[in-house]
Amino acid sequence: MKVVVAGGVVEGRRTLANTGKYVNITASSNFGNVLTVLVASVFLPFLPMLPIQLMAQNLLYDLAQLALPWDRVDAEYLSRPRRWDATGLAPFMLVFGPLSSLFDLSTFAVLWWGWHAGADPALFHAGWFVEGLLTQLLIVFVLRGRAEVASWAPSILPKRS
């Protein structure tokens, strides 16, 4: 009986760690998308992406995150009880959201001036769809390996209590 309870406790701690990772990644991605669309609405004479494309992109992005519940969690994290701690969420969003927007706005510049997609909104939509999907997937893979990211970005990642 003790082994079953202990296994349940460890699984609960793993669930908490991976849920926190999902919330951080998703919130920063959504914040970045909102920021990009707001900036784009000032400069572009059309929507930067069609609503159906945004929905498809979010669905594909969420599918990429289906592996998160099975991510390994450091033994140190699992060794003691934790509480939900969202204090690092805002700083995380304020770094990775605008970073995502920076990639998006750079893509907009290439699409507008390099590919002259200002005259062809469908090309612009497709270009941002592909770039947005690829950068979101890259961010999922980078942030899933948080120990590696923590070595170069310790001040913006939530502290492990």
Image: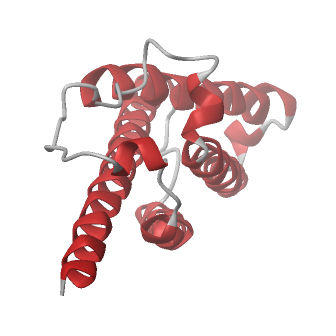
Q: Quadrant of the C terminus?
A: top left
Q: How many marks?
A: 0
Residue 140 located left or right of residue 84:
right
Q: Quadrant of the N terminus?
A: bottom left
> Is any part of residue 125 visible from this angle?
no
Q: Residue furthest front?
A: 2
Q: Residue furthest left?
A: 83
Q: Residue furthest top?
A: 155
Residue 149: image location, x then y, percent? 61, 29
Tell me if 48 is positioned left or right of 78 in this view: right
Coloring basis for residues: secondary structure
| Residue located at (34% from left, 36% from top) | 31
- The vertical placement of 123 against 57, above or below, is above
Of residue 142 and residue 107, the one placed in the foreground of this image is 142
Along the line of sight, the residue nearer the viewer: 106 or 68:
68
Q: Considering only vertical position in the picture, is 38 above or below 3?
A: above
- Given the current orientation, which residue lies at the most extreme right position? 114
Q: At x 19% / y 77%, what residue is drawn?
A: 5
Above/below status of 55 relative to 94? below
Q: Position of residue 9 (x, y in %)?
A: 22, 67
Point 64% across, 17% down: residue: 152
| Identity of the residue drawn at 71% across and 25% down | 109
Return the x and y of residue 34 as percentages of the image width and height: 35, 37
Relative image position of residue 55 (x, y in whole percent): 42, 67
User: In this view of the protein, which residue sits in the foreground, 159 or 1?
Assistant: 1
Whether residue 49 sits left or right of residue 69 in the image: it is right
